Amino acid sequence: MQEKIIILDFGSQTTQLIGRRIRELGTYCEIVPYNKFPFNDASVKGVILSGSPFSVYDESAFKTELKDIRGKYPILGICYGAQFIAYTNGGTVESAGTREYGRAHLDKFEKNNPLFKGVSENSQVWMSHGDTITSIPSTFKTIASTNEVAIAAYQIEGEKVWGVQFHPEVFHTTDGTRILENFLADICGCKQDWTPASFIESTVAELKEQLGNDKVVLALSGGVDSSVVAVLLNKAIGRNLTCVFVDHGLLRKNEFTNVMKDYECLGLNVIGVNASERFYKELAGVTEPERKRKIIGKGFIDVFDEEAHKLTDVKWLAQGTIYPDIIESLSITGTVIKSHHNVGGLPEKMNLKLCEPLRLLFKDEVRRVGRELGMPEHLITRHPFPGPGLGVRILGDITPEKVRVLQDADDVFIQGLREWGLYDKVWQAGVILLPVQSVGVMGDERTYENAVALRAVTSTDAMTADWAHLPYEFLGKISNDIINKVKGVNRVTYDISSKPPATIEWE
C-alpha cells in the first residue's frame, strides 16, 4: 500500500506548491478540500493544513473539525493552518495592522525540536499573512520566533501537532525543505520511496487489474501527457490499446507527420486522421474566440467518435488528465470552475468508462515518468500546446492561407529557440498572427502585409507565467528570418505581458 500525506486545502495559492515539495522529497501526497478528509484510508501517514485567503475569524472562513484527526496522525499547520489550530483551541489571532510579507529570520528556535533538526542559525523564512497569533493556549509552547513575530512556530505539548506562521514550501525559506523532510521522515515515519519507477510499477499493475482484457481507445495530441499515457497503457495491455491522432489542420508545421513517426517508433497502435479540410470548412468566417474553440472541440469529438466506432468492443476511454487539471476543475466548495477533460463529453456520448492513469501527477512528474519509460527526450520536453492549436493563435477568421503563414513563422521561431539552446529554458512559446496589416518596404517596393507577435513565457505550472527575457540578438535574428523567409509577413513584435493580468494565449 502506497503511504501518503494528506494536504487539507483551505484555498491557499501555494497549496499545490506544498504538494510539489512533498513529492520532490519522495513522498506521495494528495490535496483534498479542507472538509473532505479520507478517514477510511489506512495509508495516510500525516496531515498538513494549508494557508488560506481568509482570516480565521471571518464568517466565511473555511473551518473543519480536527478532533477526529488529532491523536491519530501527525499534523503540521502552515500559516492559516497554524492560526486555525491555535484559534480553535483558545488562542488569539489578531490583525497584524500591516501585512507581514517577505523575508524574516528565525532568531530564536528550539534546535532540539524534531521539526527544526538540522535548521541553520538565523535561518531565513518567508512570511505572507495579514493576521498573526498573539497568544497560544497553555498546552501549546512557542518553538520559534522572529524579530517581528513572537510566535513564529509552536507545538502542542505531548502531541505531534505543529504550526508555523511562515511558508516552508516556498523557495525563499532557506531551510524549508529540511523542515518538511523532518515532518515527513522523522515525525510521520514516511519511507520516502515514491519514485517514477515505483509509480510505473504500481500503475502498470493497477491498469492490468482494472482493464483486464478490455479494449481501450486513447485520443493522442502529440503532447507529453497523452504520450506518456499511451506508453504506460501499451506496457500494461499492449495491442488492446488503440490510439487516435486527429489532425484538425491547426497543428504546427509538419507536426502530424513527425509525431506519427515518433509513435511508430514507440510501438504504439495509432490511427492517424487528416481532417483539416473538414475543420477549415466549419471554421470559415468565424471570428469570435469562444465560438472557434467550441467548433474545434466539437469537431474533434465528432471525428474521434467516428473513428472509435469503427473499432469493436471498446469499453474504456483513456485521457492524459493530470493533477493540476483535477485541482482546478473543482473549487474547495465543490463547484465546477473549469472543465478539465481533454475530450470533454466523449465518455458519456460513447458510453465508455474513463481511465486517467496520470490524474494524480504534476507536469514535472509526468516528464520524469516519461524518461523512466525510455521515451525520446524531444517528446518529453515538448512545450504545452493548446487543444484548439493555431486556431487560438490566429486572431480573427481562419483560412488555409493564414494557417500556412502562421505555421511558417512559428517554425522559424521554434527552430530558432532550439538552435540557440533556449527551447528548454522557456515553458511555452509560439507565434500569434495579428488581424492587422502594416506598411513595409522590401527592395524598392512598398508592402502591406501581416504583422505577427512572438510569445514566450517562463513558468512551472502555467497558473502564473512571466514573459521570457530572450536575448535581443536572438529576437533580432528571428524577426529578420521571419520577414525574409515567410511570405506574407513584414512586421514582428514581441509580447512582454505576464500572467496575470494577461494570459499565455491571446484567445
Image (cartoon, helix red, strand yellow):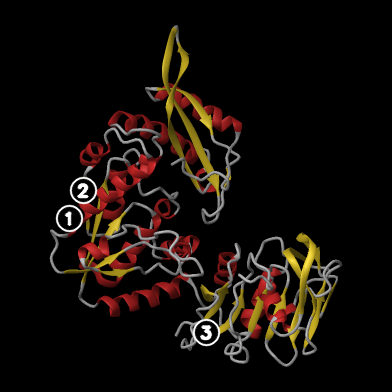
Q: Is residue 455 above or below residue 107?
A: above
Discs 3, 1 touching: Cβ within 8 Å: no
Relative vertical location of residue 462 with respect to residue 42 in this rendering, above or below: above
- Relative to 478, is 271 above or below? below
- Report the disc number at residue 283: none
Label whose residue precedes the other's in the sequence (3 or 1): 3
Residue drawn at 35 percent across, 68 percent down: 356
Dots 3, 2 in contact, CB < 8 A:
no
**Secondary structure under badge 1?**
helix
Q: Secondary structure at mark 2?
A: strand
Specify the amino acid type for callout 3. Val
Which numbered disc, 3 or 2, marks the residue that appears first in the sequence?
3
In the rendering, which numbered label is found on residue 273?
A: 2
Q: CA distance from mark 3 to mark 2?
A: 45 Å
Residue 241 in percent (x, y) is at: 23, 65
Left or right relative to 375: residue 475? right
Q: Are marks 2 and 1 in contact (CB under 8 Å)?
A: yes
Residue 19 screen position, x and y as percent: 56, 69
Specify the quadrant that holds the N terminus: bottom left
Question: What percent of the width, then of the height, locates residue 176?
Answer: 69, 69
Q: In terms of image quadrants, where is residue 229?
A: bottom left
**Local crowd at mark 1 within 10 Å, few (<14), some, or many (≥20)?**
some
Residue under pointer 1: 307
Identify the disc placed on residue 44.
Answer: 3
Which residue is at 69% across, 82% downward? 88
Q: For marks 2 and 1, give the CA distance.
A: 8 Å
Label 3: which secondary element:
strand
Is residue 111 in view? no
Q: CA distance from mark 3 to mark 1?
A: 43 Å
Amino acid under label 2?
Val
